[in-house]
Amino acid sequence: MVVARAEVPVIVHRPLDTSKRVALPRPVMVGVPGDDMSEPVVAFAFEEAALRGAKLMAVHAWSLPADASPEYLDPCGYDAARARAQAERTLTWALERWSEKYPEVRVHLAARHSLDVPVALTAASRSAQLAVVGGHCHPGVLRPSVGSTAQVLLRRAGCPVAVVPIGRTVGPIRT
């Protein structure tokens, strides 16, 4: 698979989902992971949004907090308000630097609880013009693959999908 071997961002054409009315221009959607690997993904998404004159819809979907420690548990077993606040902090932190660099790009934050993160991002892609996600690149590996979220979006997104290699510095992204 070309996407899995690529050391630079790859955009795969998917047809736009036109089943619902969406304000134009459609936003660029970025799936923001909850780890340190989000930097090249977010940078690519901001640059694309700026080039297209579109707003950026930043989505962070989670099923449990990244640090699912006892502090997130209430007597019923889960403190949803605390988990949502953590997800919103994750989004804010990942976008802060790039919002300053691209002040012309309006940003919409969407923290979504979901038991299936790829499904949540696929749903969000239905109103976007481009979905940007991270994917691990494996140059030289005999059977390369990308992460499950990228795989699902490549098959089911409602718009073209950009897969940005994570875990290494990628292509010409200006910082």
Image (cartoon, helix red, strand yellow):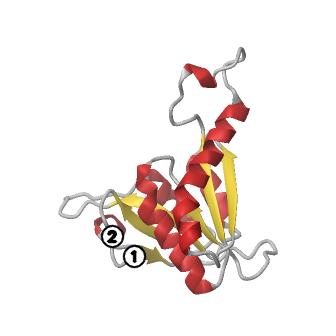
Quadrant in which the C terminus appears: bottom left
Residue 27: assigned label: none
Amino acid found under the numbered disc labelled 2? Val
Amino acid found under the numbered disc labelled 1? Ile
Where is mark 2, residue-wise?
170
Q: Which residue: 32% across, 67% down?
A: 1
Q: Residues within 10 Å of mark 2 (few under 14, many from 20)?
A: some
Mark 2 or 1, closer to the camera = 1
Q: Which residue: 32% across, 56% down?
A: 167
Q: Is residue 139 left or right of residue 80?
A: left
User: From what the image shows, is residue 135 above or below residue 64?
Assistant: below
Q: Is residue 91 left or right of residue 133?
A: right
x and y, in percent, of residue 114 in the image:
65, 43
Q: CA distance from mark 2 to mark 1?
A: 7 Å
User: From what the image shows, is residue 147 above or below residue 44?
Assistant: above
Closer-to-camera residue (60/135): 60
Residue 173: assigned label: 1
- Judged from this view, the residue extending furthest toward the right is 21
User: Label 1's element?
Assistant: loop
User: Label 2's element?
Assistant: loop
